[in-house]
Image (cartoon, rainbow, N blue to C red):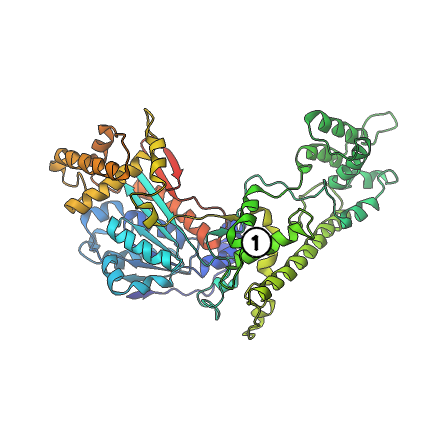
Amino acid sequence: MANFTKSKEGFDKSHKYDRQLRLWGDHGQTALETSRVCLVNATATGTEILKNLILPGIGSFTVVDGNKVQGEDVGNNFFLTKESIGQSRAKFATEYLSELNEDVSGDYMDEHPEKMLDTNVDFFNQFTIVIATNLCERTLLKLGKCLWEKNIPLLVCRCYGFIGYMRLVVKEHTGAGSFLSSVNSPLAGVISPLEESDVVESHPDNAHEDLRLDRPFEGLVKFIDSIDLQSMSKKDHSHTPWLIILYKYLQEWKEKHNGELPKVYLEKTQLKDMIREGIRKTDEGVQEEEENFEEAIKAVNTALNPTRIPSEVERLFSDSECQNLHSESSNFWILVRAIKEFVDSEGKGALPLRGTIPDMTADSERYIQLQNVYHEQAELDVSTVTQRVHDLLQNIGRDEPLDPLSESWKSLLAGGISEHEIKTFCKNAAFIRMVRCRSLEQEYCDQSEKIKDIGQHIDDEEPDDVVFYILLRAVDRFYEQYNTYPGWYTDQVESDVVKLKSCLSKLLHDWGLSFSIKDDFVHEMCRYGASELHTMASFIGGSAAQEAIKIITQQFVPFNNTYIYNAMKQTSVTVEL
C-alpha cells in the first residue's frame, strides 16, 4: 500500500473552492475534506468518478485493484498511458489522479477485491463511501453485504456499451453538518451525528419563503402594528418593506371577510387592487412610482401560502424510528422527534420558523428591524427545540456529560448533538428527507417483492430503459457460466447471442415473469462486447460523483436506488429495485 500525500498548507481554500462553497457551504466542504473514498477497480468509469471527487477536494482516496494495465485500458482511460501497460493499474491511476489536487492524498492496494474480501474484509470499514465499478455479481454481493452490515454507503457503477448503470446502496451512514464526522475527530466512532440516509439540507428548487403571514407570531404583529403607513413621509412610504405592506392590507381584507385569507384567483385579484389603491398619488392624481408596493402586489401569489407540514415530514413523524426512540437512536431521529413534539405543542401545528426573509426594496433600518424580528423568533424556536432534545436524551439514557477535549466541544450537548446541528435542523425542518435504499441481497433475491414491478416497464410494445437492467443481469449470469462476457471475442458474437438468450430466459423464469424481450436487445448487448466507452464513462463519472457528494455532505436528495442511462436515445430512468 503506497501513499501519495500532498501538502495542504499555503492555499486559500475559500478562493479555490469559491463556486462550490456557494452550493453546500463551509460545513459541506468540511464534510468533503474529511471524507475517505474507496474506489474498487480503476476502470475508465472509476477514474472519472474519482476525478470529479478529487477536484472539489475530498480528504483522501484509495484505489483497490489487482489488475495490470492492458492495451484496452490505455485506449479509454485518460489516467493511464502506454508506458504503464503490464504494470499495476491501481498504482498508475493513483499517481495520475493525485496530481489533480494537492489538497487530496491518494493510496492504492494492488490486490483483487475478491482476495481483500476473503483476507481483510475490515479494510473497507475505514471509508466514508465505497464506489465499485465492473465487479462480477458474486463479488459485488459479498462486498454489498459487508458494507450493509457496517452501514457504509456503496455506489455501484457500470458502463456497458451505450448503457450506463448506477445503484445506490445506503442503510445508515455518518453524515455531514457536524465536525464530529471527521475521521480524525477525537470522538469519531464514539458519537454519531446524523445517520441513515437522511438529508437535512435538501435544497429544494422551488421552496416558498417561511413568512407566516397567514398565522403571524406575536413579535411580528407587535412590530408591524407599530408602523403607520398613513403618517409616513413620501420617502419612508416608498421604502417600507413589501412584507409590512402586504400584512397591513391583508388585515383589512380579513376584517371584511370573516378572518379568511384570499384563496381563489378572484379574491387575490381583489387584494391586489386594495394594495394598488394604497400607492400614493401626486397632486394631479397620478400614482407615484413605488416599487415596494409593486413587490407587495406580486408577492400576493407566493407569500400567502398556508403554513403546513410537508407530507414528507409528516411521514417522518409517523415513522416507527421517530415514535420509538432508544439509546441507539441516531441523532436524526432524536431531532425529528423533538421537532414533532414542538409542532404538537409550542409550534401549534407549525414547524420552527426558518428565520430568514427575502431581499426587497426598503431602507436599511426597517429591513434590518424586520429581519431581526424573524431571527429572534427563530432563535426562540431553536431554544425550545433544544430543551426538548435535552429532555429526550435524558429519557433514553444519553445525557451523560462528556469531558471537554477542547474549546470546540463547548457547544456540544450531552448525548452528542451540537447546538449547530440543532439550529441547522430547525432551519431546514421543512426540507428534511429520508431515503431508504434496499440492500443488494434483497434486490438479487429471485422472490424480491420488486421483481413483479419490473414487468410494468417491459409489458408495453416499446419497453422503457428498465429492459437494460434485465439484460445486464442476464449478462452477469452469462459471465458466471462462461467466465467471459457475451461478444467479448468478435468471432463468437453470433454463438454468444444464443447463449445470452438462454441466460435471459432462465433469469425471467426464475423471477416468475412470462414476457419476452425482443431479440434486437440481445443482439445489441452482444455487439457491445462489454466495451467501456470513454464518453459513457465520462457521463456516468460526473453523475456518480454528484451522488457521492450528496451522500458525503448530506445535502441534496440522492436517487433511490437504481439509475439507467440509454445513450442511444439519450434517455434515462430511475427505479426502486
Q: x, y (%) of residue 246? A: 75, 37
Q: Nearer the viewer, residue 313 or 428?
A: 313
* SS at mark 1 in the image: helix
Horizontal relation, residue 2 to residue 171: left or right:
left
Query: Camera-side residue: 279 or 461?
Result: 461
Q: Amino acid at mark 1?
A: Val
Q: Quadrant of the C terminus?
A: top left
Residue 161 appears in the picture as rendered: no
Q: Position of residue 531 (x, y in %)?
A: 23, 41
Q: Label 1, on which residue? A: 336
Q: Quadrant of the N terminus?
A: bottom left
Q: Is residue 205 left or right of residue 42?
A: right
Residue at position x 69%, y 30% from top?
Answer: 263
Q: Looking at the picture, does residue 209 appear above or below residue 118?
A: above
**With 500 as the anchor, is 270 left or right in this view?**
right
36 and 81: which one is in front? 36
Between 186 and 136, the one lying in front of the other is 136
Which residue is at the far left?
A: 491
